[in-house]
Amino acid sequence: MRWIAFLLATPAIADVAFEPVAVPEHIYSGGWEHFVGGGMAAIDCDGDDLPDLLAAGGAAPMTLLRNRGGMRFERGPLPRITGGTGVYALDIDGDGASDLVVLRVGGNLTLRGDGACGFAPHDFGVPGGSAWTTAFSATWEAGQDRPTLAFGNYVDRDDPEGPFGACDDNWLLRPGPEGAYVETVLTPGFCALSILFSDEDRDGETTLRLSNDRHYYVRGGAEQMWSLREGRFLTAADGFDAPSIWGMGIASRDITGDGLPDLMLTSMGDQLTLLSGPDGLTPAPFDIGSYAQRPHAGGDGRPSTGWHAAWGDVDNDGDADLFIAKGNVDQMPDMAMADPNNLLRNDGGRFVEVSVAAGVASAHRGRGAALVDLDGDGRLDLAVVNRRAPLEVWRNVSTAGNALSVTLEQSGGNRAAVGAWVEVRTPEGVQMQELTLGGGHAGGAVGPLHFGIGAASTADLRVTWPDGTAGEWERVAPGRLTVTR
């Protein structure tokens, strides 16, 4: 185990506060095929322990913002890529350097990373297709050195009866012989805008959740769950509850302390919070304050539109808070136009809106986002891609508690240990996080996992690796940890 201490603020109960950071301009632009998308990947592409930012541009080129420390960012070299809806980083070939999967309208791309923030188009055996791709997730199945990939597609642009009722099929790609991938078509598709591999019920089986947009499937559709083990969609007979929502983003984290992931599914109108329990995932009580169904500032009383959601402990008190990027699709008259982002502070399981006081209640049309520690001080910072407005970055300057930042490393193709669970124990209780790759809205981050531990000066940490092997509890101090096996 490698450890680097954080220089953190004195733990205290204080207001959450962020300061805006000037960065090179990037705008997610384009016509109706870029009303959705606008994803961002946070990735330490040069190994300096500072996340860099990659942002899809829609009709504009994708942008790489190199993190130079001290919240200074500069443009990095990147092949000119337009038509992008989203971007995810992962180590496809297991060489220790993060590669890229770029989601696009009309043909996805894969780029190989060189470990120094250089990226070049590379054929990993992943077909690019010609669809309007808006969602992605990846996992490593047992015995495989290469990842299983899932792509979520939106409206079928070639359907002459579209766009309504013309949702495209989705794709599952599994490693095949001689570096190729074997494709399974997941049909029917209901216009996926977010997908996520996860072991939701901790039974050792990874499933793929698909969050779908009823604006285009109109009727007959719903949320979906695909079983890798059984090769089919799960149904009510399997215990899968499939609500019909305007699904746009997935955020997963155990916030109830039972060791099972809870979900935020963003939508138009209510943001659907699903809590784990004896009967599986069920809608949270409305009064916990997480539904964020209408703008909390600005005076527009029409329903809100949620996009990227992220759980993260912004004040390091041990409770996962919730950020939701908000913004009208474009000019939808029934939905709020002045629709500021939400930052919902978790106060013992009840959520209180603090984005205005914290300084992050931007009323631009938010899309993808990243809630990560950009300056290495142990506090989660924030970056948001906006449609037809500049990308925004904020530095977390809250007086916060102590924190752990946990990176996992293992041998083999799945070097980042996607699918692992990390437990952190303090006198206040046990926190658990699953390391996943996907979800969000067209972008996200893979590790390190961030745990706020309040005033605790030490914590116990244990890792359950992707193959189910559980490590021993180890006593650790606040800081940045790398756990290897």
Image: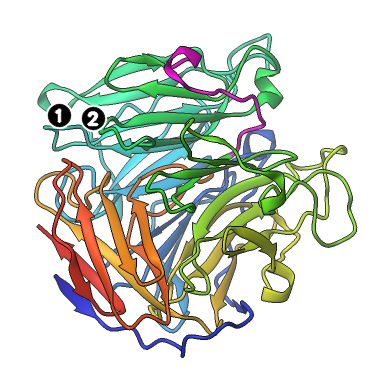
Q: Main secondary structure of the magenta part?
A: loop
Residue 71 x %, y %: 47, 79
Asked if residue 238 is among those painted magenta in the image, a careful observer would answer: yes
Q: Report whether 414 appears left or right of 49.
A: left
Residue at position x 75%, y 40% in the image: 269
In front of the other: 398 or 25: 398
Q: Report the coloring of the rendering.
A: rainbow
In the depicted structure, whether residue 151 falls above or below residue 478? above
Query: Can residue 130 be seen?
Result: no
Query: Quick one: label 2 or label 1, which is nearer the N terminus?
Result: 2
Quarter of the view holding residue 243: top right
| Circle 1: residue type | Gly
Measure the alpha-carbon separation of dots 2 and 1: 6 Å
| Circle 2: residue type | Gly
Q: Considering the numbered disc 1 on the image, is that residue within a helix, a strand or a loop?
A: helix
Residue at position x 43%, y 44% in the image: 261
Mark 2 touches mark 1? (CB < 8 Å): yes
Q: Considering the numbered disc 2 on the image, is that residue within a helix, a strand or a loop?
A: loop
Asked if residue 31 is among those painted magenta in the image, a careful observer would answer: no
Question: Quadrant location of the N terminus?
Answer: bottom left
In the depicted structure, whether residue 433 falls above or below residue 330? below
Residue at position x 20%, y 73% in the image: 475
In front of the other: 307 or 5: 5
In front of the other: 220 or 51: 220
Badge 1 is on which residue? Answer: 179
Quarter of the view holding residue 266: top right
Q: Report whether 263 appears left or right of 271.
A: left
Which segment did they paint magenta? 234-248
Residue 433 x %, y %: 36, 53
**Residue 125 - label:** 2
Q: Report whether 101 appears left or right of 29.
A: left
Question: Quadrant location of the C terminus?
Answer: bottom left
